[in-house]
Image (cartoon, rainbow, N blue to C red):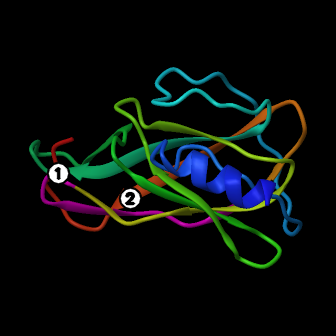
Amino acid sequence: MHRALCLVVLGFSIGLTGCGAGAGGQRSLVVIPSTDSPVPATSNSGIEVIAFGTRVDTSSPSLRYDRKPLPSAGIVINRAADNAFVVRGATGSDGRIRFALDPGEYAVIPQNTTAGSDTFQAVSETVSVSRGSFVAAQIEYESVQFGARF
């Protein structure tokens, strides 16, 4: 009952916080503070996603890569053990989003996103959340088309 109630209440915060735990893969990452979290975390542990978008800049004669924080990137969090959905959200203007989660193993699943005329894709990661800290998951999106302005 408590878990169902928690999901209903937190659902009104546009899925920026979640309730869930699991076990599975492992990855060691650094802990960082959030600068643009639309809804403050209500737990003392979870995942902070930092999304960057990289595209090829074709405006100059030489080939350059343009890497910037990627706003509005969709992120889904699933339990790693059984791939059960936990929460979803979108990054803020600084490319960050914070998910308050119980300790456990989670899959961070970036959703394809569009900026300008480019579509950006990234690969999923599995992270381990420990009690009392937020784990940083840096997601590197790459453009699959040229010419985006974001």
Please name the residue shown 42% across and 37% down the image.
95
Asked whether, in this view, residue 100 is left or right of residue 113, the answer is: right
Judged from this view, the residue extending furthest toward the front is: 1
- Residue denoted by label 1: 148
Locate residue 80, reporting x and y percent. Answer: 77, 69
Viewer-proximal residue, 85 or 12? 12
Residue type pointed to by label 2 = Glu
Please name the residue shown 82% across and 31% down the image.
133
Residue 34 vertical placement versus 102 (above, below): above
Please name the residue shown 58% across and 46% down the image.
10
Locate residue 120, reporting x and y percent. Answer: 33, 61
Q: Alpha carbon of mark 2 to alpha carbon of mark 1: how far?
A: 11 Å
Q: Give the quadrant of the C terminus.
A: top left
Judged from the image, the secondary structure of the residue bearing numbered disc 2 is strand
Judged from the image, the secondary structure of the residue bearing numbered disc 1 is loop
Residue type pointed to by label 1 = Ala
Q: Earlier in the sequence, mark 2 or mark 1?
A: 2
- Residue denoted by label 2: 142
Viewer-proximal residue, 45 or 116? 45
Judged from this view, the residue extending furthest toward the bottom is: 82
Residue 97 vertical placement versus 18 (above, below): above
Locate residue 52, reporting x and y percent. Answer: 43, 43
Q: Does the magenta segment cover residue 34?
A: no
Q: Give the quadrant of the N terminus.
A: bottom right
Q: Quadrant of residue 26?
A: bottom right
The magenta segment is: 115-125
Locate residue 122, reporting x and y percent. Answer: 47, 63
Asked whether, in this view, residue 137 is left or right of residue 1, the answer is: left
Quick one: label 1, few (<14), some, or many (20+) residues within 10 Å? some
Viewer-proximal residue, 123 or 92? 92
Asked whether, in this view, residue 60 is left or right of residue 110, the answer is: left
Q: Does the magenta segment cover residue 117?
A: yes
